[in-house]
Image (spheres, grey):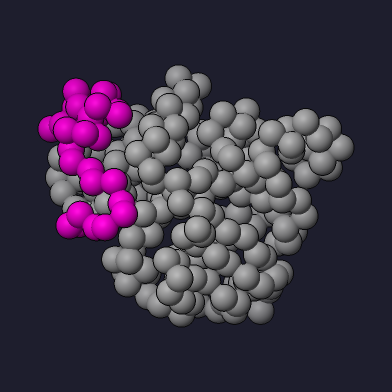
Amino acid sequence: MSLLKVAALNAFYGRAQILFDVSFEVGRGEVVALMGRNGAGKSTTMKAVMGLLPRVSGAISFMDDSIAGMTPYRIARKGLGYVPEDRRVFGDLTVMENLDTGRQPPREHAPPWTPDKLFRVFPNLGEMRDRRASRMSGGEQQMLTVSRTLMGNPRLVLLDEPSEGVAPVIVEQMADMILELKREGLAILLSEQNLHFAELVSDRVYVLEKGQVRYEGAMQSFVRDDAARRAFLGV
């Protein structure tokens, strides 16, 4: 069963159209990668799904309910979590205080999260519970942003470029984290350029080019398709 279904999604910044009839879906407990070069439309797709763009058309359903046109906070309350690429932590708040800002009640068909459970997934955070977020590295802030989103007990999480600009050791921890979330039954839509990272964690892939879906299929099939990799990612 699909948790998230997007059909014929178009999105605009002012008069400029960025997405052209983008369609995809994410099933329960599935990790799906949105891939493509810079400017392909990956982040725009996630913002459109979350209701963060003023001009969007197309069908977006979550848990079989239409969320097209909803405000972002109402979408979040339905159990759709979003981790933006720019790590919007509260710098003056501690790790624990940041986690508290994301706390929501448990919801049906979603894995419940507590700080102690998160610290088992992210041991680094557990060692700095009282540290202000402004005094953390970029990778640590990325972990905190993900953890704060999980405190909302989402059914599905949109992860925008989690490996961008963080140290290789953090990238490996992020991969372990995504696999742990998958084992918990959480569905994930992952925006990513790093093919190695996406291959480690993803079941399926949709590749965007100039705001259009140009490839879709199993991740392993894409990895083995040399022509598609070179054409759409240059690798």
Q: Position of residue 173 (x, y in %)?
A: 41, 25
In this rendering, the answer to whether 144 lies above or below 10 is above
What residue is at 42 percent from the left and 66 percent from the top? 63
Residue ID at (67%, 65%): 22
Give the main secondary structure of the magenta stretch: loop
User: Residue 136, image x and y in percent?
Assistant: 29, 31
- 102, above or below 165, in the image: below
> Residue 108, located in which quarter of the rendered image?
bottom left
On whether residue 177 falls in the magenta region, the answer is no
Task: Tell me the quarter of the image containing the C terminus.
Answer: top right
What is the residue that sits farthest to the front in this orientation? 1
Of residue 107 and residue 114, the one placed in the foreground of this image is 107
Q: 46 or 28, which lies in front? A: 28
- Depth check: 114 or 73 in front? 114
State the residue at coordinates (43%, 27%). Answer: 176
| Magenta stretch holds residue 117 | yes
Q: Can residue 88 be seen at all in this image of the molecule? A: yes
Residue displayed at 62% across by 44% down: 204
Where residue 20 sits: x, y (%)? 71, 69
Which quarter of the picture shows residue 75?
bottom left
- Relative to 124, is 33 on the left or the right? right
**Residue 59 location, x and y as percent?**
57, 75
Which residue is at the far right? 227
Front residue of 181 and 17: 181
Q: Quadrant of residue 124?
A: top left
Q: Give the magenta part as a residue range.
A: 104-131
- Establish if 105 lies above or below 202: below
85 relative to 101 in the view: left or right: right
Task: Work out whether residue 174 can be spotted.
Answer: no
